[in-house]
Image (spheres, helix red, strand yellow):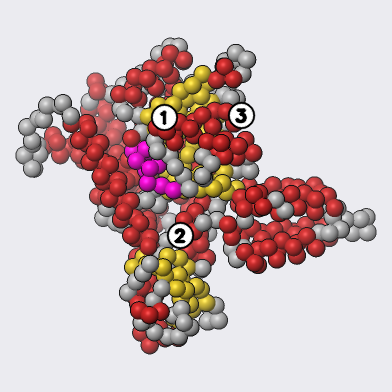
């Protein structure tokens, strides 16, 4: 599986093993850019990753370090939201030991040319190097700074630059800094442009006697290009769920926690194996589980069903007092169908949210749930119940599903070209076939548990949690391991210790 020489092994993986599986390969020698220093960059995409990339508009880009025994080697990952699972999905990888903008720019060029990578929006950390690479390779893309990293940068500088004279206690200084940090959070999440700009000016007045931090903050707010990179009013509707780099940050944490076991691997050919086998298998199985349904809905459909149920509990005679059409009246005639509807909060009587209908489709809501999840909320479902409008979200997801199915069909047809078609098996299949399928299902459940590590850590922190279900899970898993051990002991010649490299 791995040649003794690491460089030779990497070359075999990229140019033989992955190429045979129709991976899109990126490989370049960077020595010509660095006075002959031994520097490299390589990347790869599976056909499934290319398919998802082509139907997506928004992405997160980030680098993770400590991927090998050599500290200068970095893994870059492009992540988007999978249209069916609703989770972060890696669509392209690049590994390099050159930490400049050059390999990023060349890689993005490659993706644009070879994989039709035409993003509308990309969220990154506050990295000028990544900004320069994206602007050069993808000038049409809008760059957004991750909210979390912006706030962390502000808070770090606030702590070092905000001073009070000796007449104030350390506690008073701490309270002053906390108040300023809270106001910065308020600025960062404000989506109304007028309120946003007014809050910035108010904050400048608040820190006018803090010249160091005021000068620093003005750099973020008085350059329009930079302001638009982090200001929430300038984030397009379809990119709202990407205002932080959570998709890619959680992916990198998962990679190190689960696949690396929090330890560095020694060689990059091992990294290629993990990404193209273990990781690829998991994401394929996750989509398969949703397709087969496994007796339950996927996470997105589950959330939609919950929101629909909550909306359905509102009594009919309550609707006139909870819904105002774009003309500010009760009613749902087609003359006032498109526009901004006002839906009263289900919890707070004097709170109203704006649900927008455009092109006869429900597009968005101003409630916190929609702004965070970008999935039709209970207010949207209530409006749908009232006027019968469809969701833009559902229409777009169905289109994405059709595109993916067509791509799968194209890939299947390509794989069948010049191949001899074997005689079809009977519809029931043999007992051996059914046995193989059972083990595939077991593998899918195993992958699910493998990736439930973070959920288990969260469950440990919930006070007063009923342990009954936990005991059932523990016994079921213990029985699973016992039965697997019996299989191994009954068939010793088929099992061996894998000579894997770490």
Estimate the spatial distance between the alpha carbons at disc 2 and disc 3, rounded to whole Å. Answer: 34 Å
Q: Does the magenta stretch include residue 462?
A: no
Residue under the point 38% across and 17% down: 12
Q: Where is residue 385 in the image (x, y as percent from the top left)?
A: 34, 75
- Number of other residues with Cα within 10 Å of mark 1, as a class: few under 14, some 14 to 19, many 20 or more: many
Q: Considering depth in this image, is 498 or 22 the residue closer to the camera?
A: 22
- Which residue, given by chain and number where applicable, does mark 1 sit on? 44
Give the SS element for disc 3: loop
| Dominant secondary-structure state across the stretch colored magenta | helix
* Residue at mark 3: 100
Query: Which residue does the numbered mark 2 point to in the structure image?
Result: 374
Q: Is residue 454 visible?
A: no
- The magenta stretch is 48-57
- Cα separation, mark 3 vs mark 1, equals 20 Å
Q: Do the residues labelled 3 and 1 touch (CB within 8 Å)?
A: no
In primary-sequence order, the first of circles 2 and 1 is 1
Sequence-first tag of 2 and 3:
3
In front of the other: 379 or 443: 379
């Amino acid at each position: 599986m791995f040649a003794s020489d690491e460089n030779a092994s990497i070359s075999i993986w990229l140019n033989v093993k992955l190429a045979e599986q129709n991976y899109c390969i990126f490989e370049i020698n960077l020595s010509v850019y660095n006075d002959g220093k031994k520097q490299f960059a390589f990347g790869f995409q599976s056909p499934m990753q290319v398919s998802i990339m082509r139907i997506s508009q928004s992405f997160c880009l980030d680098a993770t370090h400590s991927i090998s025994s050599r500290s200068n080697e970095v893994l870059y990952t492009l992540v988007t939201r999978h249209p069916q699972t609703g989770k972060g999905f890696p669509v392209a990888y690049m590994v390099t030991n050159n930490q400049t903008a050059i390999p990023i720019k060349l890689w993005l060029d490659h993706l644009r040319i070879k994989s039709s990578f035409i993003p509308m929006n990309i969220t990154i950390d506050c990295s000028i190097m990544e900004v320069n690479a994206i602007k050069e390779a993808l000038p049409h893309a809008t760059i957004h700074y991750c909210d979390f990293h912006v706030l962390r940068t502000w808070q770090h500088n606030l702590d070092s630059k905000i001073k009070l004279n000796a007449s104030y206690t350390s506690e008073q200084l701490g309270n002053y800094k906390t108040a300023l940090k809270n106001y910065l959070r308020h600025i960062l999440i404000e989506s109304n442009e007028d309120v946003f700009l007014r809050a910035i000016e108010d904050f400048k007045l608040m820190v006018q006697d803090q010249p160091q931090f005021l000068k620093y903050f003005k750099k973020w707010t008085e350059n329009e290009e930079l302001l638009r990179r982090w200001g929430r009013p300038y984030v397009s509707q379809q990119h709202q769920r990407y205002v932080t780099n959570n998709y890619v940050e959680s992916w990198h944490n998962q990679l190190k926690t689960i696949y690396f076991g929090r330890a560095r691997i020694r060689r990059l050919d091992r990294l290629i194996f993990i990404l193209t086998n273990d990781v690829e298998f998991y994401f394929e199985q996750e989509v398969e589980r949703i397709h087969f349904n496994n007796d339950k809905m996927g996470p997105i459909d589950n959330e939609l069903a919950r929101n629909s149920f909550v909306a359905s509990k509102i009594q009919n005679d309550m609707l006139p007092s909870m819904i105002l059409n774009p003309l500010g009246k009760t009613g749902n005639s087609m003359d006032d169908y498109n526009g901004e509807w006002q839906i009263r909060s289900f919890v707070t009587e004097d709170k109203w949210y704006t649900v927008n209908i455009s092109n006869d489709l429900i597009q968005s809501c101003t409630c916190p749930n929609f702004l965070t999840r970008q999935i039709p909320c209970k207010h949207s479902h209530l409006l749908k119940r009232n006027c019968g409008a469809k969701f833009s979200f559902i229409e777009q997801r169905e289109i994405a599903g059709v595109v993916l199915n067509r791509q799968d069909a194209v890939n299947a047809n390509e794989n069948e070209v010049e191949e001899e078609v074997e005689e079809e098996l009977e519809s029931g299949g043999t007992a051996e076939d059914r046995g193989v399928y059972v083990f595939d299902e077991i593998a899918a459940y195993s992958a699910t548990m493998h990736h439930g590590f973070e959920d288990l850590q969260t469950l440990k922190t919930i006070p007063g949690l009923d342990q009954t279900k936990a005991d059932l899970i523990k016994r079921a898993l213990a029985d699973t391991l016992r039965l697997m051990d019996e299989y191994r002991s009954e068939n010793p010649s088929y099992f061996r210790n894998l000579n894997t490299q770490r």
